[in-house]
Image (cartoon, rainbow, N blue to C red):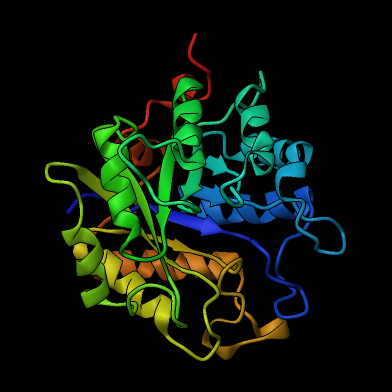
Amino acid sequence: MEKLIIEASINESARKEDNPHVPYGPEEGARDGIAAAKAGAAIIHYHPRDEEGQNLWHLGTEMYLECYRLIREECPDVLVYPTQRGAHEENTPHLFELARDEVEGLELATVDIFPEEGITGHDGSFVAKLLEDLRALNVSYSIGVRHTGHMRHIARFHEQGLIGDTLIMKIFWNEFSLGPPPGIDGLKMYLDLLPPGLECQWFNTVYDGLPGEPTLRRTSLLAAATGGHIRTGIGENPMLDGKRGQDAYTNVEHVEMAVEMTHMAGREVATPDEARAILGMPPREIGMRPKA
């Protein structure tokens, strides 16, 4: 099997009250991003958070830029990318502000499928428009799915030419009632619905992981053993193994866990440049620039 890509989701909306290691501002985010990259993460996902921990979401462009530039001072090749919150135009201006930044640019975005009105033969959904606009700016994107019905949207986007030769897909597992149960049967449901002939690079992601459940460890090992990739980090699983407070895991420890699982499955960890090649992305010096 090819090399495994590790992504570190370093803060999301997790709170320091649960895990004091959660980074808030750009300096803390850069500190954890650098440490996670040095531990083996090829991709860093960061949310702009103020001193009280409030998520700035689409209003945090300058905080994104400050954090990413600090990361690149020590890890110039690592992939960094922001959040995308919901299928509304007012939630996405930061993506285009980042993409047009002359220094940093934007190589990668994530687009979660949140269509409010189903997809028809003449799709005019915001998600499709967002994909078109990102492609026009030379931004690669992963597509996030939360239940198997979203695979029908992916098939439609593929028909519309909005997915290239390689689909980058995030499978967001949840222990509650969202989507199929996390595991091999649920994974097969997703992969069996891929459009024929489309290469898929998928990431295991446990969203809002319950502290007492081994879901992140179990599904990460499943990903390593079956050709997938691992997204980990305290942003989505701040109290892994039920640990809280000073005993809670750090982002580095999450990445180290993913590295160990990669090796257990007989695979090697991908570098940032290797990750770009696996995901069908251009080299950074090309991918960070909007199309002429």
Q: Residue furthest left?
A: 197
Find residue 29 and report its horizontal and vertical position in percent: 70, 53
Q: Residue furthest top?
A: 292
The x, y position of residue 263, in whole percent, is 28, 65
The structure residue drawn at horizontal position 53% and vertical position 18%, both measured from the top left corner, is: 290
Q: Is residue 207 visible?
A: yes
The percent coordinates of residue 124 (x first, y second) are 45, 35
Question: How many numbered discs sit on the rendered protein?
Answer: 0
**Residue 254 vs residue 259: left or right?**
right
Residue 198, quarter of picture: top left
In this rendering, does residue 78 appear at all?
no
Q: Quadrant of the N terminus?
A: bottom left
Q: Is residue 210 left or right of residue 69?
A: left
Q: Compared with residue 23, is residue 239 higher up or lower down, i.e. above or below?
A: below
146 to the left or right of 30: left
**Could you tell me residue 282's position as x and y percent?**
38, 26
**Who's the residue at 45% across and 28% down the image?**
132
Q: Name which quarter of the figure residue 242 lies in.
A: bottom right
Q: Nearer the viewer, residue 255 or 107?
A: 107
